[in-house]
Image (spheres, grey):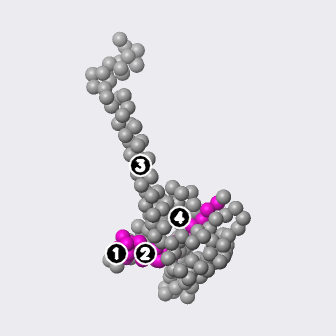
Amino acid sequence: MKEYLIVDGYNIIGAWPELAKLRDIELEQARDRLIDALADYQAFSGMKVYLVFDAHQVPGLGGKYEQSKLEILYTKEKETADELIERLTLGLIGRRRHVYVATSDMAEQSVVFGQGAFRLPARELLVKVKQSQREVRERIESKVSLKKNSIDSKLTEEQRALFEKWRRGGS
């Protein structure tokens, strides 16, 4: 079963406390942190993640970019993020596919749910992202501690030199 996650970027930034504080100081940094967190989450979860940013106030054709294997989409002029999310959802819904839409916008949740997607509130996504970060950190720490507990780490320099001499065929 292939899984997709479509994220309403500015909605999530506004809903996650750390990013909301940062947004008020430097919006671009908040966006970058969200991109980094979702790229890591995509790698951990195996889901294909699409991050949608609303650019309807900005003139232009919109755009699609890839950063850290994460699809980042900006809406076209006079298009809202909700419209792009709905179009993307319809395009992804199909057999053997689960599509999740992360937003705390209740109206948008209802629309995508009606299209067959699963709703994922911003707070729930934050819990999933934090949990994945914790699991990755624990895996790294366990690998580091395994290396620290190796026999080699318990030997003195003299013992290491003796073993190395024996390994090379010396007596």
Q: Amino acid at mark 2?
A: Ala
Residue 122 screen position, x and y as percent? 48, 72
Q: Which residue is mark 1?
A: 21
Q: Decide which of tag 4 and tag 3 comes sooner along the chain.
A: 4
Q: Is residue 10 magenta?
A: yes
In the rendered view, does 165 fall on the left or right side of 46? left
Query: Which residue is identified by label 4?
Result: 70
Amino acid type of the residue tagged 1 in the rendering:
Lys
Dot 3 or dot 1, earlier in sequence: 1
Residue 143 % position (x, y): 42, 42
Tell me the amino acid under the disc marked 4: Leu
* Residue at position x 31%, y 26% in the image: 155
Question: Is any part of residue 99 visible from this angle?
Answer: yes
Quick one: quadrant of the C terminus?
top left
The span shown in magenta is: 2-23
- For disc 2, the marked residue is 15
Q: Comparing marks 1 and 4, which lies closer to the viewer?
A: 1
Q: Is residue 7 magenta?
A: yes
Which of the two labelled residues, at mark 1 and mark 4, occupies the earlier sequence position?
1
* Mark 1 vs mark 2, CA separation in Å: 10 Å
| Front residue of this view, candidates 2 and 156 | 2
* Residue 20 locus on image (x, y percent): 38, 75
